[in-house]
Image: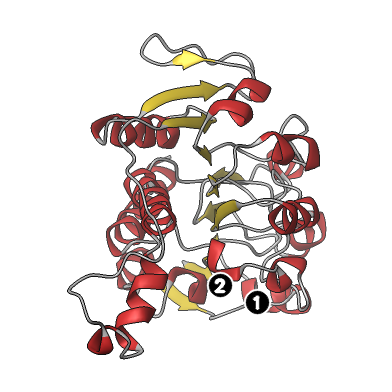
Amino acid sequence: MKIVCLDAKTLGDDADLTLFSQFGVFEAFDTTSLEERIEHIGDAKIVLTNKVLIDKEVMDACPNLGLICITATGMNNVDLEYAKHKGIMVKNVAGYSTASVAQTTLMLALNLLGKLAYYDAYVKSGEWVKSPIFTHLAQPFSEIKGKRWGIIGLGNIGKEVANIATAFGAEVLYYSTSGANHNGTYRQVSLDEMMQTCEIVSIHAPLNEKTRYLVSKEQLLMMKKGAILINVGRGGIVHEGDLAEAMDSKELFVGLDVLEKEPMEANHPLLHVKHPERLIITPHVAWASVEARRELIRLVGENIKDFLRQ
C-alpha cells in the first residue's frame, strides 16, 4: 500500500514522519502545486494533506484513493461531499494544539503589554551602558491583573486562554460567535460591549459567514486607547485594511498570527503602519509547538489505523 504526504514542509523540517512507513510505502513531498497533485498522489491509497486542495478532479483521477488524512483541524481544502459520494474517507485532527495556541496568545499579550521589544532593543543598542541610573522607564507598561480580557469564541482554545487570563488576575468576558455557546463561569456580553470595555481582546473563532470581518472599522474604533487586539483564530475575521487605518488613527496594540491571505502579500497595509512597534505579526505558528506537531502526527497515525481496521 502506498501513502503520500503532499506538503510535508508545512509540518516543519524537524517533523519525524517515519511513523507512516509502518503502514506501507511512504513518500513525502515538501510541497505540491495544483498542477502536481495528481502526479504526486498517483496510485496512493492514503494521502496526507495540510493545505493542498483535494477536489473532484483529483479524486476522479486517483481511483485508488481510500483515505484523505488532513494534518489539521480545518477541512475546507477537501470536497467533503464528493469524497462521500466516491466512498473516500476523510479524517482531520482536532484538539492537538490547544496548549500551543493558548501559550502563543499569552506570549503576544505579554510582549505587547510589557513593551518587551522596546526594552530589549534599548539594552542591546548599548544605551543602558550609558545610563546615569540603574533603570529605564521610557515606555510605561502595565499588568494583566485587573484588566478586562474579552474572548471571541469560547471553544477549547478560548476556554484555555480564559483559564490563563483568570490565573493572571484578569476579569474574563466572552462573546459567542455562534450564539449557541453558554458558559456559567464567565459572563457573556455583546461584541460592542466587549470592544468598548476590554483592555485585551483575543480571537479564537473559526472563519464562517458569521465571523468574516466580524472586527472591522466600527468595532476597532470602539476600542479603548491602548487596548490590545490578538487574532490567533483565522485571517478574515479582522478586516486588515480597516485595522491598519485604525492603528494609524488611534493607539492600539495588535498581535496577529493569522492573515486573510497566507503567506502575507507584498505591500500589505500592515507593513506600513505609522507605529510598527505596536504590532507583532507571526507567520501562522501558534498551532505548531514541537509538542503539538508531535501529537498531530501521532493522531494522524491513529486515523490511519482506524481506517485499516475497517
Nearest the viewer among 174 and 218 is: 218
Q: Residues within 10 Å of mark 2 (few under 14, many from 20)?
A: many
The label shown at residue 32 is 1
Coordinates of residue 248 in the picture (x, y in percent)? 73, 59
Residue that extends furthest to the left in the rendered view of this protein: 134
Residue 260 in picture, x, y percent from top left: 72, 56
Depth check: give the residue in front, 122 or 242: 122
Q: Are marks 2 and 1 in contact (CB under 8 Å)?
A: yes
Quadrant in the picture for residue 18: bottom left
What residue is drawn where x is 54% and y is 80%? 29
Amino acid on which the number 2 mark rests in the picture: Asp
Q: Which residue is drawn at the image coordinates 50% and 77% (left, top)?
A: 9
| Between 157 and 175, the one nearer to me in the picture | 175
Name the image quarter holding the C terminus.
Answer: top left
Give the residue displayed 37% in from the left and 37% down from the top: 161
In the picture as drawn, the residue positioned furthest to the top comes out as: 184
Asked if one can make out residue 24 in the rendered structure from this viewpoint, the answer is no
Vertical arrangement, residue 74 with respect to residue 169, above or below:
below
Could you say whether the residue bearing mark 2 is in a helix, strand or loop? loop
Q: Residue at x 63, y 67 (%)?
A: 275
Mark closest to the chain's N terminus, 2 or 1: 2
Q: What label sits on residue 14 in the rendered view?
A: none
Q: Is 85 placed left or right of 13 in the picture? A: right
Kind of residue sitting beneath label 1: Thr
Of residues 171 and 302, the one nearer the viewer is 171
Residue 288 in sight: yes
Check the image and name the residue furthest to the front: 132
- Residue where numbered disc 2 is placed: 7
